[in-house]
């Protein structure tokens, strides 16, 4: 392992429905695997059986425009849920490759109408859930 090959998040990009979100500063997407306990006779340990999963994430961005918030607001006020595709790209020039992950069915689950403070940089965080994803590119080294 060479320290220079550790991927630096500074080279990350977020794409929503094919558009680069230039104001993005952080993206998190994770899948939590759900299990049920299985008790087997004559075994003291509790075993686990996978029963499903839940995908959640968030995009944190600098507050530059109201474009995404306005889209969620309009959808919500018209009784629609906002569903988008999200691509996370991480391409540090010193890394052993780049990584792209497509989240196919991200449902945006909140809207920030106002959140500001004097002498503070404006940021917005939008949470999402999802059920489908695909690695488009993988770092294999």
Image (cartoon, rainbow, N blue to C red):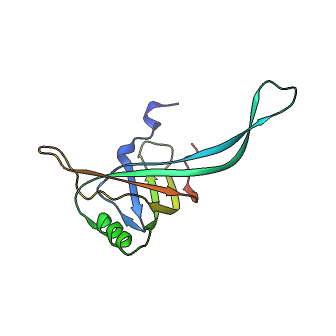
Q: Residue at x 44, y 41 (%)?
A: 7
State the residue lying farthest toward the right: 42
Q: Residue at x 41, y 46 (%)?
A: 93
Q: Could you tell whether 50 is left or right of 74 in the image?
A: right
Residue depicted at x 33% and y 72% = 74
Q: Report how many numbered discs are placed on residues in the image.
A: 0
Rendered location of residue 73, percent (x, y):
32, 68
Q: Is residue 3 visible?
A: yes
In the displayed structure, 90 sits above or below 131; it is above
Q: Residue furthest left?
A: 118
Question: Considering depth in this image, is 130 or 36 the residue closer to the camera?
Answer: 36
Which of 105/52 is in front? 52
**Farthest top residue?**
44
Residue 46 in the image: above or below residue 83? above
Picture coordinates of residue 120 (x, y %)?
Answer: 16, 44
Towards the viewer: 63 or 24:
63
Residue pictured at 62% horizontal, 50% vertical: 53
- 2 with respect to 43 (left or right): left
Does residue 63 appear to the left or right of 136 in the view shown? left
33 or 140: nearer the viewer = 33
Q: Quadrant of the C terminus?
A: top right
- The part of the image, by quadrant, that contains residue 40 is top right
User: In the rendering, at what x and y percent does residue 20 appear?
Assistant: 36, 63
Q: Position of residue 113 (x, y in %)?
A: 26, 59
For the question of whether residue 90 can be seen, the reply is: no
């Amino acid at each position: 392992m060479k320290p220079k090959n550790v991927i630096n998040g500074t080279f990350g990009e977020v794409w929503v429905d094919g558009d680069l979100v230039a104001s993005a500063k952080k993206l998190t997407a994770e899948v939590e695997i759900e299990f049920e306990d299985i008790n087997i006779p004559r075994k003291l340990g509790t075993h686990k059986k996978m029963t499903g999963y839940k995908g959640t994430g968030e995009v944190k961005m600098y507050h530059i425009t109201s474009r995404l918030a306005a889209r969620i607001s309009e959808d919500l006020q018209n009784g629609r849920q906002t569903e988008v595709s999200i691509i996370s790209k991480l391409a540090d020039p010193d890394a052993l490759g780049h990584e792209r992950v497509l989240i196919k069915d991200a449902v945006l689950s909140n809207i920030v109408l106002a959140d500001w403070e004097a002498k503070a940089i404006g940021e917005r965080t939008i949470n999402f859930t999802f059920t489908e994803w695909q690695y488009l590119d993988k770092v294999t080294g």
